[in-house]
Image (cartoon, helix red, strand yellow):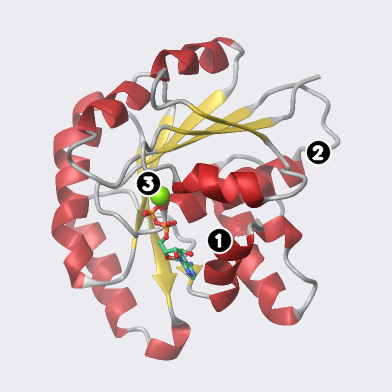
């Protein structure tokens, strides 16, 4: 029986690989496929729902979102025994590798676009959505990631208003900024492996909520 979740990276820079290789007891199957994106067809043919995480701006949280969504969905489905159900694809954060992103989108059922609440991210995110995602006709959702509640709501509200003004579908869930996420990427840990303290529980709830909202299964 294959795992219920498969995470793929097609980012040649491969921070996902570096991260995934450090995680002990990965809760999902994982592979790097930037040299052979046609392998994605096999996963789609297996009947799985394929989700591409995309934004051609680096550092917006694609890898963080991919691995942690993969982890929470695997956690929710761990007793389901229905074989492979969801594939999450991490993609490059650069314009040079646009062909790889386009290749991944051929196999996708939907697209998640992480975006931090900062003005610098607006234009590159808009380019990815308008030039790359919208022409595919795929359903997509923009997810605000890396909002620090201690900064107040002004930047968050500005970003949400910008997204809404563009007419882009936006996730209600906001992924907050927590040091535990940044540290986890260094230590090789996904949210479902965080220590059981209050802050870590809050941090992982954002990903459980996002999975539920996206319809990937979940719990409130
Ligand atoms: N919600 C968050 N809270 C804290 N740190 C975050 C969060 N999202 C991303 N980061 C950190 O920001 C950096 C860039 O994130 P990453 O997922 O690698 O972006 P991308 O894959 O889009 O380049 C990493 O160090 C990551 O740990
Ligand atoms: Mg990345």
Quadrant where the N terminus sits is top right
Residue 133 location in percent, x, y? 25, 35
Label 2 near ligand 1 (CB < 8 Å): no
Query: In the picture provided, is 151 more to the left or to the right than 4?
Result: left
Q: Secondary structure at mark 3?
A: strand
* 131 relative position to 55: left or right: left
| In contact (CB < 8 Å): disc 3 and disc 1 | no
Q: Earlier in the sequence, mark 3 or mark 1?
A: 3
Residue at x 72% of width, y 53% of height:
219
Q: Residue at x 46, y 25 (%)?
A: 33
Q: CA distance from mark 3 to mark 1?
A: 24 Å
Q: Is there a contact, CB below 8 Å, between mark 2 and mark 3?
A: no
| Labels 1, 2: front one | 1
Q: Which of the 4 image quadrants contains residue 200?
A: bottom right
Per the image, the residue denoted by label 2 is 78
- Displayed-image quarter of ligand 1: bottom left
For residue 141, the mark is 3
Residue 66: which disc? none
**Helix, strand or loop at disc 2?**
loop
| Residue located beneath label 1 in the image | 185
Q: Is residue 146 visible?
A: yes
Which of the two residues, 52 or 218, is positioned nearer the viewer here? Answer: 52
């Amino acid at each position: 029986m294959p795992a219920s979740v498969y995470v793929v990276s097609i980012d040649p820079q491969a921070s996902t690989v570096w991260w995934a290789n450090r995680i002990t007891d990965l809760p999902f199957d994982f592979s790097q496929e930037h040299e052979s994106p046609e392998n994605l067809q096999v996963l789609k043919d297996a009947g799985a729902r394929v989700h591409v995480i995309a934004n051609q701006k680096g550092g917006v949280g694609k890898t963080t979102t991919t691995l942690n969504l993969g982890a929470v969905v695997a956690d929710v489905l761990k007793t389901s025994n229905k074989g492979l159900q969801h594939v999450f694809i991490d993609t490059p954060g650069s314009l040079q590798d646009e062909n790889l992103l386009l290749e991944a989108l051929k196999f996708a059922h939907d697209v998640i676009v992480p975006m931090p609440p900062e003005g610098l991210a607006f234009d590159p995110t808009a380019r990815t959505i308008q030039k790359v995602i919208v022409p595919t006709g795929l359903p997509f959702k923009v997810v605000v990631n890396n909002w620090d509640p201690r900064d107040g709501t002004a930047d968050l509200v500005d970003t949400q208003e910008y997204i809404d003004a563009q007419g882009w579908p936006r996730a209600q869930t906001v992924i907050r900024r927590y040091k535990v996420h940044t540290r986890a990427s260094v230590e090789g840990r996904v949210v479902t492996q965080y220590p059981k303290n209050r802050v870590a529980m809050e941090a992982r709830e954002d990903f459980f909520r996002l999975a539920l909202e996206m319809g990937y299964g979940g719990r409130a």
